[in-house]
Amino acid sequence: MQLRFAMQAGRTVLTHKQHQGPMLVQRPFYPEGGACHTYLLHPPGGIVGGDRLSLQTQLADGAHALLTMPGATKFYRSNGAQAELSQHFLLQAGSTLEWLPQDSIFFPGAVAALDTRFDLASGARLIAWETLCLGRPVLQERFDLGRIGTRLQLWRDGLPLLHERLRIEGGDLAKLGEQPLAATMVATPAHDGALELARNVLAALPRQRGQPALLAGATLMDGLLVVRLLGSDNLTLQSALQQLWRALRPALLALPPCPPRIWST
């Protein structure tokens, strides 16, 4: 799927959409003026071994798009073939992207690769997150078989700000502290005040039996805020991400929170 957003007559418009296969985009919403809220629909039947999906999104100068999904992206058990999802976001000067998807669920036995890249020009702004759910914790179903490879990249003006890989194989979750859920949130350009806001949100997260419900931390490097969370309950994790977004949006985008409608359904 290819999407392009541009400013026209004072608001951001989806000027181009092209898709082949089951990925779809719903009609944009404008609940807060010029920003374009858009819902992406992944295949209702999930992604299976051998599937190759691609999302390429471009924002022209000054455009502002908020992209989210009504449901999780599901990678099902494979017969050996790898499922691939590639996501590339190109932000031109002065544009703003809020990439706030639901989680990616990897069923036991899934063989999958997830590749996400953000390329930002000078003055572009980004708030984004990515959530991985290994197995189905709510059903006590562990990711005890399969292979997952993920890559997350963030570049500004051709220089790397973040480049990380994760590989999980055969149910070994030691890299994630034996937690089935992992999320990474990024925001740029960020400042010390944003770091303090993020840490305040994390410090106020609920506790279970005297222990934090989530393992979480926030760092700031070269104007990039990175927040990482680990846990076992998806509702708690999603709530934490939304709280972070509500706190950071006014500080980084000078806009009040305007949650997508789908979050309240």
Image (spheres, rainbow, N blue to C red):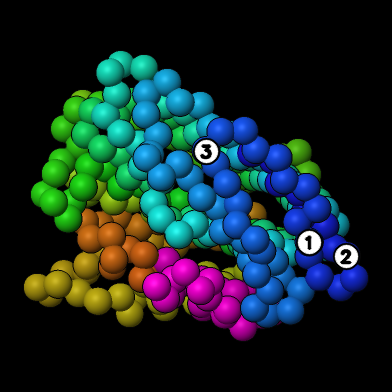
Q: Secondary structure at mark 3?
A: loop
> Would you identify the image quadrant in which residue 71 lies?
bottom left
Q: Which mark is residue 232?
A: none
In the rendering, at what x and y percent does residue 250 appear?
62, 80
The residue sitting at the top extreme is 80
Quadrant where the N terminus sits is: top right
Residue 79, compared with residue 251, is above or below; it is above
What's the magenta bit mostly, secondary-structure-wise? Answer: helix
User: How many other residues sit within 10 Å of disc 1, few (<14), some (14-19) or many (≥20)?
Assistant: many
Is residue 214 found left or right of 34 in the rendered image? left
Q: Which residues are magenta?
A: 241-265
Instruction: Give the CA separation, mark 2 to mark 1.
Output: 6 Å
| Crowd class of label 3 (few under 14; some 14 to 19; many from 20; radius 10 Å) | few
Q: Residue at x 22, y 42 (%)?
A: 135
Residue type at tag 3: Pro
Q: Quadrant of the C terminus?
A: bottom left
Q: Are marks 2 and 1 in contact (CB under 8 Å)?
A: yes
Determine whether the residue tagged by mark 2 lies in a helix, strand or loop: strand
Q: Which mark is residue 13?
A: 1
Question: Which residue is at the front of the view, 138 or 170?
Answer: 138
Asked which secondary structure carries label 1, the reply is strand
232 relative to 120 in the view: left or right:
left
Whether the magenta-drawn stretch holds residue 147 is answered as no
Ranked by sequence position, the earlier of labels 2 and 1 is: 2
Which kind of residue does numbered mark 2 sit on?
Gln
**Badge number at residue 8:** 2
Residue named by callout 3: 22
Q: Is residue 191 placed above or below 124 in the rendered structure? A: below
Note whether residue 223 is visible: no
